[in-house]
Amino acid sequence: MTRKLGIADYPIAEKTPEALRTATGKPLAELDLAGVREGRVRLEDLRITEQALRLQAEIAEAAGRPTLAQNFRRAAELTAVPQEVIFAVYELLRPGRARSRAELEAMAERLEADHAAPLVAAFLREAAVLYEQRRLFGQRF
């Protein structure tokens, strides 16, 4: 699909299902109970994809919800990040878990360099500044 999606395309799975494919390349029309029973539909087919999240971002942007759109874009980046890295990021973002600004910035560098996630990295850098201002490093709640 080459055109940008808008509000009229929401929800995508119902209004524009041809715009979506599973992580393994199947069209949504192939996702059914019979496919699950026969083993044609696997767990990988049910996971959210970067493409679906980016399309959701387009719709959010068209609806005048830029913050939601940015959240969808960050989520799209995270689809390619291993779970253990996502859990490490989550743990660092909990107030009092990171010991310093440098720790959050190091994780941001890792996300950019190893996982092509510049939006999530920018989010971590922003959090590092705010955590420092609010003295949240090493102070557990």
Image (cartoon, rainbow, N blue to C red):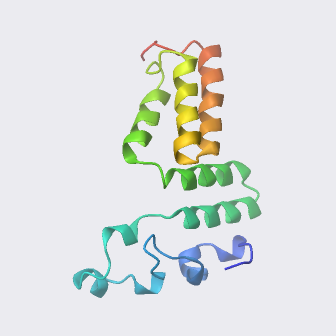
Q: Nearer the viewer, residue 2 or 111?
A: 111
Judged from this view, the residue extending furthest toward the front is 113
Residue at 57%, 33% (x, y): give it.
108
The answer to whether residue 5 is above or below residue 28 is above
Where in the figure is residue 122, as x and y percent of width and height? 65, 37
The answer to whether residue 109 is above or below residue 24 is above
On-image quarter of the N terminus: bottom right
Image quadrant assignment for residue 101: top right
Q: Nearer the viewer, residue 141 or 137?
A: 137
Residue at 65%, 22% (x, y): give it.
129
Residue at 62%, 62% (x, y): give it.
54
The answer to whether residue 6 is above or below residue 16 is above
Where in the figure is residue 44, as x and y percent of width and height? 36, 67
Image quadrant assignment for residue 76: bottom right
Q: Is residue 3 toward the left or the right of residue 130 in the image?
A: right
Q: Is residue 91 toward the left or the right of residue 113 in the image?
A: left
Image quadrant assignment for residue 121: top right
The answer to whether residue 131 is above or below residue 18 is above
Q: Nearer the viewer, residue 73 or 15?
A: 73
Residue at 55%, 80% (x, y): give it.
14
Where in the figure is residue 8, as x and y percent of width and height? 70, 76
